[in-house]
Amino acid sequence: MLLHISSEGLPIYQQIVEQIRFRIVSGQLKVGDEMPTIRGLAESLRVNPNTVARAYRELEHESLIEKRRTTGTFVAELPRQFSLAQRRKLLSPDIDRLLITARQLDIDWDDLINLLQKRYGELANPKEQS
């Protein structure tokens, strides 16, 4: 599992939680997918195993993953689809970063909206760009 850990900003365990949560909610990780072992993920991220264990505990508390005795940790059966409000909430950190960066670069609101619309169109219709 490829996760990106930054030394700035959020605590490492929280970065792990957010990235795994996003992958589950977005469907990149499916119900029943096996999670890396705590030790294996800690080694690949070069963090303390207790950090990964803390992240897994939080994901278990949210019922996103489940431990199965002797077999490992898996993406849990989701009791329901994630609501639009929950999916929007996942965007909040990225929106905050975008707005802060736009302010630092002195990009005004209208210009930012135009940039977003243009980029959204490019991503939605990649063939039209070539």
Image (cartoon, rainbow, N blue to C red):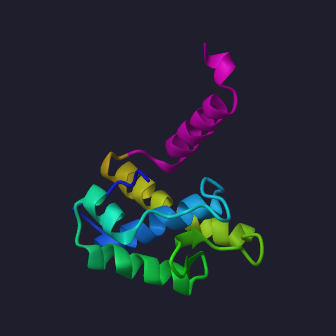
The answer to whether residue 127 is above or below residue 12 is above
- Give 3 or 72, whichever is nearer the viewer: 72
Q: Count all numbered tags in the image, as a single digit.
A: 0
Q: Is residue 121 left or right of residue 95?
A: right
Q: Residue at x 39, y 55 (%)?
A: 3
Residue 90: image location, x then y, percent: 56, 66
Residue 85: image location, x then y, percent: 69, 72
Residue 49: image location, x then y, percent: 28, 74
User: Does residue 109 belong to the magenta stretch?
Assistant: yes
The answer to whether residue 73 is above or below residue 100 is below
- Quadrant where the C terminus sits is top right
The answer to whether residue 35 is above or below residue 56 is above
Q: Is residue 46 left or right of residue 58?
A: left
Q: Is residue 81 left or right of residue 123?
A: right
The answer to whether residue 25 is above or below residue 105 is below
Q: Residue at x 61, y 53 (%)?
A: 28
* Magenta segment: 107-130
Please identify the dominant SS of the magenta region.
Answer: helix
Q: Residue furthest bottom?
A: 61
Q: Residue furthest front?
A: 70
Residue 129: image location, x then y, percent: 61, 18
- Give 24 or 1, whichever is nearer the viewer: 1
